[in-house]
Image (cartoon, rainbow, N blue to C red):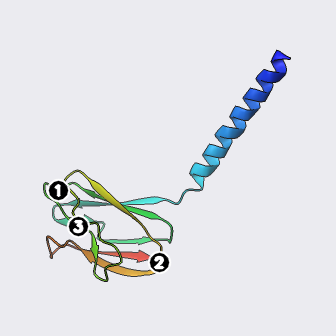
Amino acid sequence: MRVATTRVLVLATWLASGAMVAAAASQPPTHTVTIEGMQYNPAALMVHRGERVVWLNKDLFPHTVTAVDKTFDSQGIAPNASWSYVATRNGEYAYGCRFHPTMKGRLTVQ
């Protein structure tokens, strides 16, 4: 009886770990844009709907990621902080920093 219980537990553990791996593998990719030196890097990024973009602020002062058409707006991203956005609509989105108007980027969603 004890061997059967052990086999059932091993099988249940194996199935659960396989389900977790499958779930992790099916997650859409995450893209990172680094904010540093008063620039977005990369300045232009192409993603697919459902994918996540993370902007990581490595500057010494806050920045924003604000779409020109207001589709998204991070508000202030503090130094060493990040903000993420999941792309939901196809299109091209020019964006910039409200605090530093010379900073420009473009997100293309397919």
Label 3 to label 1: alpha-carbon separation: 12 Å
In this picture, residue 30 sits left or right of residue 94:
right
Front disc: 3 or 1: 3
Q: Assess whether mark 1 and mark 3 are in contact (beta carbons under 8 angstroms).
A: no
Compare marks 3 and 1 and give the one earlier in the sequence. 1
Which residue, as the protein is rendered here, is positioned at the far right?
1
Q: Give residue 43's quadrant in the image.
A: bottom left
Residue 83 percent across, percent down from the top left: 32, 59
Compare marks 3 and 2 and give the one earlier in the sequence. 3
| Secondary element type, mark 3 | loop
Residue position marked by numbered label 1 in the rendering:
59
Label 3 to label 2: alpha-carbon separation: 21 Å
Q: Residue at x 15, y 75 (%)?
A: 102
Q: Amino acid at mark 2?
A: Arg
Q: Residue at x 49, y 59 (%)?
A: 29
In this picture, residue 62 sits left or right of residue 44:
left
Category of crowding for the residue at label 2, using alpha-carbon neighbours closer than 10 angstroms: few (below 14), some (14–19), many (at least 20): few
Q: Amino acid at mark 1?
A: Asp
Q: Residue at x 72, y 39 (%)?
A: 15
Residue position marked by numbered label 3 in the rendering:
64
Residue position marked by numbered label 2 in the rendering:
89
Can you say which quadrant of the picture contains the N terminus?
A: top right
| Secondary element type, mark 1 | loop
* Residue 107 drawn above or below residue 36: below
Q: Amino acid at mark 3?
A: Thr
| Secondary element type, mark 2 | loop
Residue 62 percent across, percent down from the top left: 17, 60
Work out whether residue 44 or residue 28 is closer to the camera in this orientation and state it. Answer: 28
